[in-house]
C-alpha cells in the first residue's frame, strides 16, 4: 500500500518544492501531491537563498530546464541547497530537477555523476516504459518489482559505481504508448525495423535498445543527506503506480534523513503570498490573453501541426517547438483560473494592473509571430527534414530567434512570457494554498483533502 492517500494519510512535515522555472511540470507536481494528500510549500530560489530550507526535511525539484532553475537559485541559493543536503536533507528531482544536481558545470555538481553524451543516448522518447525496481527498498513497499512509469524526453545518466550509491530502478521494456520521436513503438515492435537507416534519415538515435538496462532512477548519499534523481516523471497525473512510488520515496527521504527532529523542522511555515490580489479588470485581461493563446492552439490544430496527447500536453509534428506552445496554453489557463478564484472587487493592486497589461501585450505579439512561423515551418518542411535548431531560411531563422532564442532552453519572447507566468503562478498558488489552509483550520482539519488533479 502507498504511504499517502485516503487510506494512509500523510502524518509527516510538509515537503518543500522549488517552484522557479518548473512551468507545467510544477503544476502537475503540486496537483498530484494534493491528490495524494501530501502537504507541500512552494519555495522560490530567493526563499532558498534566504535560508528557508532550514525548516524542511525534503526538497522536491520538478522538471524544467536545469539552467533556468540554477539561475533562479543564484550563488547563495546554491550554497544553501548544498548545506541542506550535506546536513541531512532529502532531495528528489525529476528530469531537469535531477539534471540540476549532476556534474559538470553549469549543473550544480552536487553529485559526481554526469549526463550521458547526446550521441549515445535515446534523446527523444516519451510515454510509458517499464522499469525494474529494487525489491526490499522502502520505495517499493507495496509495489510490484516491475511497473510502468512515464518519461517525457529524458536525458540519461552516464552511470558508474559511486560510494553509497546505486540504481534504484532500471529501464526494462517499452510500454504500450512508448513513442520515439514521432514513431509509435507499439506499431513497430513486430516489424523488422532497419534502425540504422531510419536513424540516418532522422538524424538522431531511435533504437530503444539504447535505453534498456540503463538506470532510470538513482539514489546517492552526499554527506548526511540523500538524493533520489529520477528521469521518469513519477508525478505524472493518473499514473497510479508511479504516484504511489513517489509517495513512498517522499516518506523514505523524510524518515531516513539526517535532519534533527526539532520543532522548527516539524512545523515549517510556508512563505506568505503577497498582499496584492488581481482585480476584476485584471482578470478580464487575463481572459483575453487566454483567448489569444487558445486561438493559436486552434490554429495549429486546423493546420494539422499538433493535437492534444492528454489534457496537459500536446503531440506535435517533428521540427516544431511544440512543448513551449503546450506549456504556454496550460499555464495561461491555470493563471486565469487561479486569478479568477482570488480576485477582489474594485481597482485591485497597481502591480497586477501593469503585469497583466504587459502579459496581454507580449502574448499578442508572440501569438501573431508564432502563427507566421508555424506556417513558414510547415512550408519549409515540404522540402525535407525540419530541425528545431540550425538554419532553415531567413524568415524562419529570424522568427525563431525572436520567439525562442537560439538554444533549446528557451529565451526570447517565449522566455519573457514564461518568466511572467512563473511569477504570477507562484503568487496565485500561494494565495490559493493560504485560503485552503485557513479553510482547514476553520473546519478543524490538519491536512489537505486529496482532490482530483487540475491538469488531468
Image (tube, grey):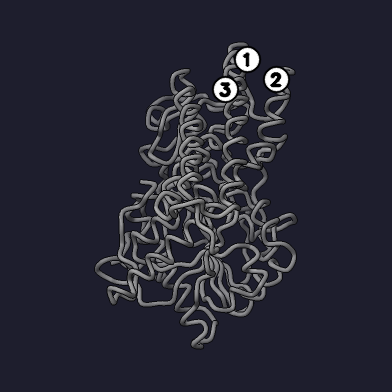
Q: CA distance from mark 3 to mark 2?
A: 17 Å
Q: Is residue 78 above or below residue 239?
A: below
Mark 2 = which residue?
Answer: 392
Mark 3 = which residue?
Answer: 371
Mark 2: few, some, or many residues within 10 Å (few <14, many ≥20)?
Answer: some
Q: Residue at x 57, y 49 (%)?
A: 64
Q: Residue at x 46, y 19 (%)?
A: 304
Q: Are marks 1 and 2 in contact (CB under 8 Å)?
A: yes
**Mark 3 or mark 2, whichever is nearer to me:** 3
Q: Residue at x 64, y 29 (%)?
A: 388
Tag on residue 432? none
Closer to the camera, 297 or 233?
297
Mark 1 = which residue?
Answer: 380
Can the viewer see residue 450?
Answer: yes
Q: Residue at x 61, y 56 (%)?
A: 159
Is 413 positioned to the left or the right of 5 in the image? right
Sequence order check, earlier mark of 3 and 1? 3
Mark 1: few, some, or many residues within 10 Å (few <14, many ≥20)?
Answer: some
**Secondary structure type for disc 1:** helix
Q: Are marks 3 and 1 in contact (CB under 8 Å)?
A: no
Sequence order check, earlier mark of 1 and 2? 1
Amino acid at each position: 500500500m502507498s504511504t499517502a492517500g485516503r487510506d494512509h494519510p500523510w502524518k509527516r512535515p510538509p515537503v518543500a518544492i522549488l517552484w522557479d522555472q518548473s512551468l507545467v511540470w510544477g503544476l502537475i507536481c503540486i496537483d498530484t501531491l494534493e491528490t495524494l494528500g501530501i502537504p507541500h510549500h512552494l519555495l522560490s530560489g530567493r526563499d532558498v537563498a534566504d535560508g528557508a530550507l532550514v525548516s524542511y526535511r525534503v526538497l522536491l525539484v520538478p522538471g524544467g530546464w536545469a539552467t533556468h532553475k540554477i539561475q533562479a537559485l543564484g550563488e547563495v541559493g546554491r550554497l544553501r541547497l548544498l548545506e541542506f543536503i550535506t546536513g541531512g536533507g532529502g532531495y528528489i528531482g525529476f528530469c531537469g530537477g535531477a539534471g540540476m544536481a549532476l556534474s559538470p558545470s553549469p549543473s550544480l555538481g552536487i553529485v559526481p555523476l554526469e549526463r550521458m553524451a547526446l550521441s549515445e543516448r535515446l534523446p527523444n522518447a516519451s510515454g510509458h516504459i517499464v522499469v525494474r525496481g529494487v525489491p526490499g527498498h522502502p520505495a517499493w513497499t507495496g509495489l510490484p518489482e516491475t511497473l510502468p512509469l512515464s518519461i517525457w524526453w529524458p536525458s540519461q545518466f552516464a552511470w558508474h559505481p559511486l560510494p553509497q550509491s546505486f540504481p534504484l530502478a532500471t529501464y526494462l521494456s517499452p510500454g504500450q504508448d512508448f513513442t520515439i520521436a514521432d514513431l509509435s513503438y507499439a506499431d513497430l515492435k513486430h516489424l523488422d525495423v532497419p534502425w540504422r537507416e531510419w536513424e540516418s534519415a532522422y538524424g538522431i538515435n531511435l533504437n530503444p535498445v539504447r535505453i534498456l538496462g540503463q538506470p532510470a532512477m538513482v539514489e546517492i548519499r552526499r554527506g548526511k543527506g540523500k538524493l533520489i534523481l529520477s528521469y521518469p516523471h513519477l508525478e505524472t497525473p493518473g499514473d497510479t503506480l508511479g504516484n504511489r512510488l513517489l509517495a513512498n520515496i517522499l516518506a523514505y527521504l523524510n524518515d531516513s534523513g539526517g535532519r534533527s527532529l526539532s520543532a522548527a523542522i516539524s512545523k515549517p511555515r510556508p512563505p506568505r503570498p503577497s498582499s496584492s490580489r488581481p482585480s476584476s479588470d485584471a482578470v478580464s485581461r487575463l481572459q483575453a490573453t487566454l483567448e489569444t493563446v487558445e486561438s493559436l492552439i486552434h490554429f495549429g490544430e486546423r493546420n494539422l501541426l499538433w493535437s492534444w496527447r492528454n489534457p496537459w500536453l500536446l503531440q506535435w509534428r517533428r521540427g516544431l517547438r511544440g512543448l513551449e506552445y503546450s506549456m504556454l496554453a496550460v499555464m495561461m489557463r491555470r493563471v486565469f483560473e487561479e486569478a479568477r478564484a482570488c480576485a477582489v472587487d474594485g481597482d485591485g493592486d497597481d502591480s497586477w494592473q501593469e503585469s497583466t497589461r504587459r502579459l496581454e501585450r507580449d502574448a499578442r505579439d508572440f501569438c501573431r509571430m508564432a502563427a507566421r512561423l508555424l506556417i513558414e515551418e510547415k512550408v519549409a518542411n515540404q522540402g525535407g527534414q525540419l530541425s528545431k535548431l540550425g538554419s532553415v531560411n531567413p524568415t524562419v531563422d529570424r522568427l525563431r530567434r525572436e520567439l525562442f532564442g537560439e538554444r533549446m532552453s528557451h529565451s526570447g519572447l517565449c522566455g519573457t512570457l514564461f518568466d511572467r507566468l512563473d511569477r504570477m503562478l507562484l503568487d496565485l498558488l500561494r494565495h490559493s494554498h493560504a485560503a485552503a489552509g485557513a479553510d482547514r483550520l476553520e473546519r478543524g482539519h490538519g491536512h489537505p483533502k486529496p482532490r482530483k488533479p487540475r491538469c488531468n
